[in-house]
């Protein structure tokens, strides 16, 4: 099992002490460091800034939002970071949701699977640098020939030679069609909420994608990275309550009431009644009660919280269910060392 430190996206201000956490994660044997974005901080700049002090860990976005930048611009970000880091960039992408895409980026959300397919195809053309980049559209036509065009655009090839044509592209996906397409066109799957209990379902979704003509990889060369609240503690109650607060936000508030992909995911897990209660309470402004409505079983499904031996056993279960990398959030160097000790068996970790 590999570990990735999930820095997430910023709140009202940059997180304190992040540079120290990144350094400690590399010392402790973590495989990568990942940053996200929503409608504030971006995903690439923290990786370039804090990652500059690292030499080994992968630097990944989990996720960069498609609508935040054009496919060519995203490819520029990735190839630049890949050069600066000596080939350590992992480009994690996701469609976000209609509230953010249409309300923040001012773009249409429709046809997310088709948009993702085009987006990834253009990035791969940029990275391959075999010919000037072209795309017939309809979502990202290159050259642009639509309304307002002067008709003067010409296909271009990147001035900068990408370091790697095969820079890994992972996709954040939650639904069956999205996960299947991810297995078809990407190098890895970022599972936002993962439950080993549903491993057979996930494996079937992935198998559907691997079986498609022209699929890029098979299961043996494809990476499954699961976001996992993981806390090593002898007193799990407080940590579970914090996870419930986060889950209630994503279930009840991260998305439109009629289109919330996180809520849909937990309905598929069998928590439809709880999702309805959480959503109602959260949207009524009763956020504490919404967190209280998150079942303990749901937390146990998607998180690993407990003492060292409990964590070690649970991680084995996640690994056996098909997870290659755990993306975990840690708030202190001590937490990083405890997680590394439990998951990687690092008995003699260097101390800061």
Image (cartoon, rainbow, N blue to C red):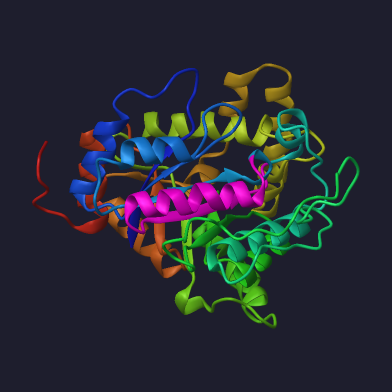
Magenta stretch holds residue 166:
no
Q: Give, as a single range, the part of the protein colored magenta.
A: 69-96
The answer to which of 121 and 313 lies nearer the viewer is 121
Residue under the image location 44 percent in, 36 percent down? 45
Query: Residue 46, image x and y in percent?
Result: 41, 35
Query: Residue 231, image x and y in percent?
Result: 33, 41
The answer to which of 14 and 136 lies nearer the viewer is 136
Position of the C terminus, as image quadrant, is top left
Magenta stretch holds residue 73:
yes
Residue under the image location 38 percent in, 28 percent down? 238
Q: Is residue 41 left or right of residue 250?
A: left
Residue 268 figure quarter: bottom right
Q: Is residue 39 left or right of residue 17?
A: right
Query: Residue 203, image x and y in percent?
Result: 58, 71
The answer to which of 310 and 81 lies nearer the viewer is 81
Q: Is residue 175 left or right of residue 168?
A: right
Position of the N terminus, as image quadrant, is bottom left
Residue under the image location 49 percent in, 68 percent down? 165
Q: Residue furthest front?
A: 152
Is residue 234 at all visible to an observer of this figure? no
Residue under the image location 60 percent in, 59 percent down? 123
Q: Is residue 60 above or below residue 185?
A: above
The answer to which of 34 and 152 lies nearer the viewer is 152
Q: Is residue 223 above or below residue 227?
A: below
- Tell me how many marks there are: 0
Is residue 180 at all visible to an observer of this figure? yes
Query: Residue 181, image x and y in percent?
Result: 68, 66
């Amino acid at each position: 099992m590999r570990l990735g430190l999930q820095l997430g996206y910023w709140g009202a201000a940059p997180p304190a002490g992040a540079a120290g956490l990144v350094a400690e994660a590399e010392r402790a044997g973590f495989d990568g460091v990942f940053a996200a974005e929503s409608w504030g901080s971006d995903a690439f700049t923290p990786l370039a800034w804090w990652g500059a002090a690292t030499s080994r860990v992968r630097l990944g976005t989990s996720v960069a939002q498609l609508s935040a930048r054009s496919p060519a611009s995203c490819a520029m970000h990735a190839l630049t970071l890949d050069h600066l880091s000596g080939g350590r960039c992992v480009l994690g992408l996701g469609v976000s949701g209609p509230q953010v895409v249409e309300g923040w980026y001012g773009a249409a959300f429709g046809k997310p699977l088709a948009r993702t397919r085009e987006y990834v195809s253009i990035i791969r053309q940029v990275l391959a640098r075999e010919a000037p980049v072209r795309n017939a559209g309809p979502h990202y036509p290159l050259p642009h020939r639509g309304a307002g065009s002067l008709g003067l655009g010409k296909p271009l090839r990147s001035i900068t030679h990408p370091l790697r044509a095969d820079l890994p592209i992972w996709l954040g996906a939650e639904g069956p069609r999205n996960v299947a397409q991810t297995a078809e066109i990407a190098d890895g799957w970022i599972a936002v909420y993962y439950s080993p209990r549903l491993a057979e379902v996930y494996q079937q979704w992935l198998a559907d994608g691997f079986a498609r003509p022209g699929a890029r990889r098979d299961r043996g060369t494809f990476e499954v990275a699961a976001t996992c609240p993981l806390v090593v503690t002898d007193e799990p109650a407080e940590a579970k309550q914090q996870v419930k607060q986060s889950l209630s936000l994503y279930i009840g508030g991260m998305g439109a009431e009629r289109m919330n992909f996180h809520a849909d995911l937990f309905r598929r897990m069998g928590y439809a009644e709880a999702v309805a209660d959480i959503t109602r309470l959260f949207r009524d402004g009763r956020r504490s009660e919404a967190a209280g409505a998150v079942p303990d079983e749901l937390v146990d499904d998607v998180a690993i919280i407990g003492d060292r031996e409990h964590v070690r056993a649970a991680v084995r279960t996640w690994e056996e269910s098909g997870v290659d990398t755990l993306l975990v959030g840690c708030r202190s160097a001590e937490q990083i060392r405890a997680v590394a000790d439990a998951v990687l068996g690092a008995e003699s970790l260097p101390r800061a």
